[in-house]
Amino acid sequence: MGAKLSEDARKKIIEALNEDRVAELTAIIQYMGHHYEGEGLESPPILELFKSTAMDEMRHAESLAERIVYLGGVPVYKPSGVSRGGELREMISQDLGLENGAIERYRKHIKLCDELGDSTTRLLLEQILMQEEGHADAFETALGRGK
Ligand SMILES: [Fe+2]
Ligand SMILES: [Fe+2]
């Protein structure tokens, strides 16, 4: 496994993937929280968007964990810095903030994988990044700031 990757490269990639995983776990808790807390507010489609996005993030957190284990690391299990509700627009803004952070971080980590020669992890992160861009787009549209 990872025969062509040096010990140092594997450690760096595991660390990067765990950083991504913390953010995914945070997003899951935050979006599901918004899904429940938004109950009774005026916009059911947005509540569904919180839920379906949280489910995408669950798949991301799982894929990251699988890759971390494959590389010989231990996946982290704790979220960090979950933002709680307020009114609906505030929730969407908080979530858009996480997505923009994710996009920036995945771009950085794709570059790292490139430098370290791990094309498999790079491909995984590219697939996740594509979905994060879709999430950011959906939250922007929900805020009425569509491009
Ligand atoms: Fe994600
Ligand atoms: Fe996302």
Image (cartoon, rainbow, N blue to C red):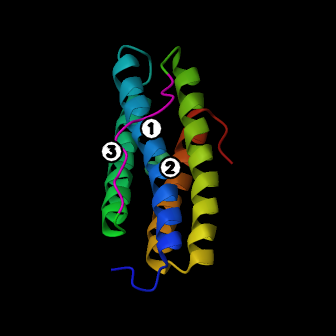
Mark 2–mark 3 Cα distance, whole angstroms, equals 19 Å
Q: Which residue is the site of mark 3?
A: 55
Which comes before the other along the chain, label 2 or label 3?
Answer: 2
Quadrant holding the N terminus: bottom left
Q: Residue at x 34, y 41 (%)?
A: 77
Residue 139, above or below 71? above
Q: Which residue is the site of mark 2?
A: 19
For badge 2, the amino acid type reads Glu
Label 1 packing within 10 angstroms: few (<14), some (14-19), many (20+):
many
For badge 3, the amino acid type reads Met
Pick the residue in front: 117 or 125. Answer: 117
Residue 136 screen position, x and y as percent: 57, 46
Q: Residue at x 61, y 68 (%)?
A: 112
Q: Residue at x 44, y 77 (%)?
A: 120
Residue 123, above or below 100? below
Residue 38, above or below 21? above
For badge 1, the amino acid type reads Ala
Part of the protein shown in magenta: 73-83
Farthest residue in the bottom direction?
A: 4
